[in-house]
Image (spheres, rainbow, N blue to C red):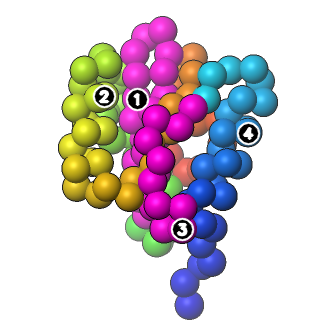
Amino acid sequence: MSEPRVKAGLWVKMALRIGQADGRFAAVLKRGDEDAGGVLVVLRAPAGLCVLSQTRDGDGQAAWLRATGDDPVDQATADAYVARQVKFDPDLWVLEFERPDLMPPFDGKLL
């Protein structure tokens, strides 16, 4: 039996509230499908950006992958990655959070 899934639109609202709780910037850059859209998360810091992509770990549990790599990237690299993913999946949500430590504001396993 698979684990229950939260609708994407509801999850996005929760993530934005958590991201803004400490007074930092959080925004929807692209609206996706309210029910079943995937999510990309752009983390912004003075050192650069990191894009997180939803994935599954080896046990099938929800996790996040640093899709642009372990090191911060520039705006053009992050934008190019997001554009490729949106072209592949037009139902994708894209969120951005100001996070000086490049860690997501919400709970989630990072791979």
Q: CA distance from mark 4 to mark 3?
A: 19 Å
Query: Which of disc 2 and disc 1 is earlier in sequence?
Result: 1
Mark 1 and mark 4 in contact? Answer it, CB < 8 Å.
no
Give the camera-side residue of 9 and 53: 9
- Residue under label 3: 35
Residue 99 can be seen in this image: no
The image's mark for residue 17 is: 4
Q: In the rendered image, which quarter is residue 90 located in? A: bottom left
> Which stretch is magenta?
27-56
Q: Is residue 62 above or below residue 46?
A: below
Q: Position of residue 65 (x, y in %)?
A: 40, 47
Mark 2 and mark 3 in contact? Answer it, CB < 8 Å.
no
Q: Secondary structure at mark 1?
A: strand
- Residue under label 2: 78
Three-letter amino acid code at the position of disc 3: Asp
Label 4 crowd (10 A; few <14 / some 14-19 / many >=20): some
- Residue under label 1: 50
